[in-house]
Amino acid sequence: MANQNKRLSLPSNSKEGILGRVSSTISQSPIIHQGKQAASDTAYVTKRFLKSTGKAAWIAGTIFLILVVPLIIVMDWEQQRARDAANQLAGHASPWST
């Protein structure tokens, strides 16, 4: 009986418990190291991708504001003038005339 109790107890010279030893063994594992390296590489690639995507979005937005918005304004203005001209031909007064 005394031998069984002695076997189950932790050695007295151990500074860390069983969880500490298991944790340090796992954290020093080459598989864990490779996993951490893969996660780090993935984070780096994702950061670079999002940064370049953000630049592309900024360029596309700027081009849209410089080229497309004025085009839309001009097309709307021309459509309104054509509608006013059709109303004048039909005998209706234009809302712009005084």
Image (cartoon, rainbow, N blue to C red):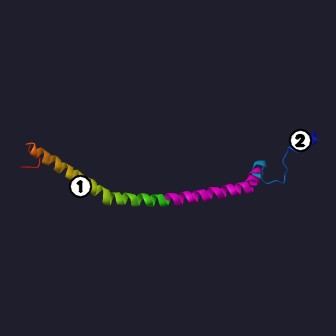
Q: How crowded is mark 1: few (under 14 residues within 10 Å), some or many (20 or more)?
A: few
* Residue 34 shows in this picture: yes
Q: Quadrant of the N terminus?
A: top right
* Amino acid type shown at disc 2: Asn
Instruction: Classify residue 91 as left or right of residue 46.
Output: left
Q: Name the residue under label 2.
A: 5
Q: Nearer the viewer, mark 2 or mark 1?
A: 1
Which region shows up in magenta? 22-50
Q: Which residue is at a point 75% across and 51% down the rendered structure image?
A: 20
Q: Which residue is at a point 67% across and 55% down the rendered structure image?
A: 35
Q: What element carries label 2?
A: helix
Decide which of 26, 72 is in the foreground and name it.
72
Q: How crowded is mark 2: few (under 14 residues within 10 Å), some or many (20 or more)?
A: few
* Residue 27 shows in this picture: no
Which corner quadrant of the image does residue 71 belong to? bottom left
Decide which of 72, 35 is in the foreground and name it.
72
* Amino acid type shown at disc 1: Val
Q: Does the magenta stretch include residue 41?
A: yes
Estimate the x, y position of residue 12 in percent, counting from the top left.
84, 51
Q: Mark 1 points at which residue?
A: 74
Main secondary structure along the magenta-highlighted residues: helix
Estimate the x, y position of residue 89 in percent, counting from the top left.
10, 45
Which corner quadrant of the image does residue 69 belong to? bottom left
